[in-house]
Image (cartoon, rainbow, N blue to C red):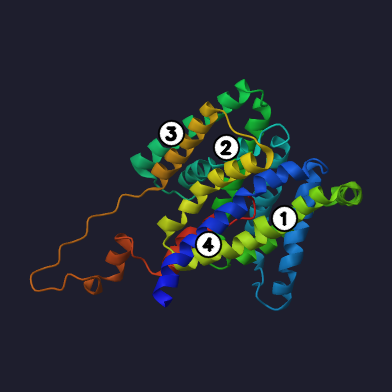
Amino acid sequence: MAAERRTTSPWTFMAATAILWGSAFPAIRVALDGYSPTSIAILRLVCAAAILAPCALTGRISRLRRADALRMAGFGLTGMTAYQLLLYAGERHVEGGTAAMLVATSPVFATLLGMLVLKERPGARGIVGLLVALGGALVVAMAGGAGGGSLTAMAMIVVAAAAQATSFVLQKPLLRRYSGLDCIFYGSLFGLLPLLFAVPDAVRQSAAVGWREGAAVGWLGLGCTVLAFCTWSRVLRAATAATSSLVLYAVPVAALALDAALFGNVPAPLAGAGGLIVLLGVAVAATRRTPPRRVAGAGAPSGAGSRSAGEARAAGDAPAGDERARGRHAVTAGR
């Protein structure tokens, strides 16, 4: 029974995470009926920080070191402030499903920044995947523009994806010393700082909106940020990094399905094809060629128990802790 739970639980939590993150896009559309993009960002961050505050009071949130404050501030300003403001402003004129497909280009920018900042080498396969994904984004933009969508708004969403990718690069070194929960909490606090001037407007809008808009903002903070973090953490504990990455590919699919079910918004065939091209490119860029394993020598056991830890990691059987470390950079409250 325990073995069965370990087998099925990752997929259950992966589906839940994709739906939670995907639900952010239609929720944003609802919230925009009563709130400005700045007010949505403020209320979402306040909601997330308030929910996580008891964890800070009970010691479950690590203390932020002074040496890491600048990098954590950069993570919050890019992943929490810039990403959300640009995404919300763009979704005023772009359907949620289309926005989700454009945001799916974020790993492309993350890889490019990793090459420039972290000196990572994506290899030929990574470069091809990046070009394919960017080509898919152009197809989505052309399809949306032909259908009456705003190309300026789509450009804002692509810039939002670049801002999110920047936050990934800034967050990656922090995850050696802090958990994803720590980053969400401190990132939300830093992300709120440049928005404090608009708090009075957010309060006035909250008093005037209906229950649908208020519930949508509450869901963005609770469901799309805190609950999504919890399910994503369960995925990272129970599945490999390669399997966990499937969640990121499933988010646009979930967003499209929810957008169609709730609002009847079905993307044009060309936009859907462009979204598939984006996901294909991201999948190709994320795929690493597995080095060939050495053949066990004569008389040596050939089972998994005879391999060293390094060989096991090369074969994709890294311990759960290593897999979590490789996958946790995707944890973000920006979706």
| Mark in the foreground, 4 or 2 | 4
Q: In the rendered structure, are the residues bearing label 3 and label 2 in contact, judged by CB atoms less than 8 Å apart? A: no
Q: From the top left corner, tell me how far across and down residue 67 is, in percent.
A: 63, 64
Q: CA distance from mark 4 to mark 2?
A: 24 Å
- Locate residue 144, reporting x and y percent: 60, 27
Is residue 171 visible to the viewer in this orientation of the structure?
A: yes
Q: Is residue 213 left or right of residue 238?
A: right
Q: Which mark is residue 44?
A: none
Marks 4/3: CA–CA distance: 29 Å
In depth, the one of 258 and 244 nearer the eye is 258
**Real-space CA distance between mark 4 and mark 1, rounded to the nearest whole angstrom:** 18 Å
In the picture of the structure, the residue carrying the numbered disc 2 is 102
Residue receiving disc 4: 13
Q: Give the residue drawn at x 76%, y 56%.
A: 218
Q: Which residue is mark 3?
A: 132
Sequence order check, earlier mark of 4 and 2: 4
User: Which callout, 3 or 2, points at the residue further toward the start of the chain?
Assistant: 2
The three-letter amino acid code for the residue at tag 4 is Phe
**Quadrant of residue 17 within the rendered picture:** bottom right
Q: Is label 4 or label 3 in front?
A: 4
- The answer to whether one can see residue 68 in this image is no
Question: Which kind of residue does numbered mark 2 sit on?
Answer: Leu
Between marks 1 and 2, how big is the CA–CA gap? Answer: 22 Å
Q: Earlier in the sequence, mark 4 or mark 1?
A: 4
Write the residue at 58% across / 43% down.
257
Along the line of sight, the residue nearer the viewer: 245 or 10: 10
- Element at label 1: helix
Q: Indicate which disc, 1 or 2, sits on the residue closer to the N terminus.
A: 2
The numbered mark at residue 219 is: 1
Local SS, label 4: helix
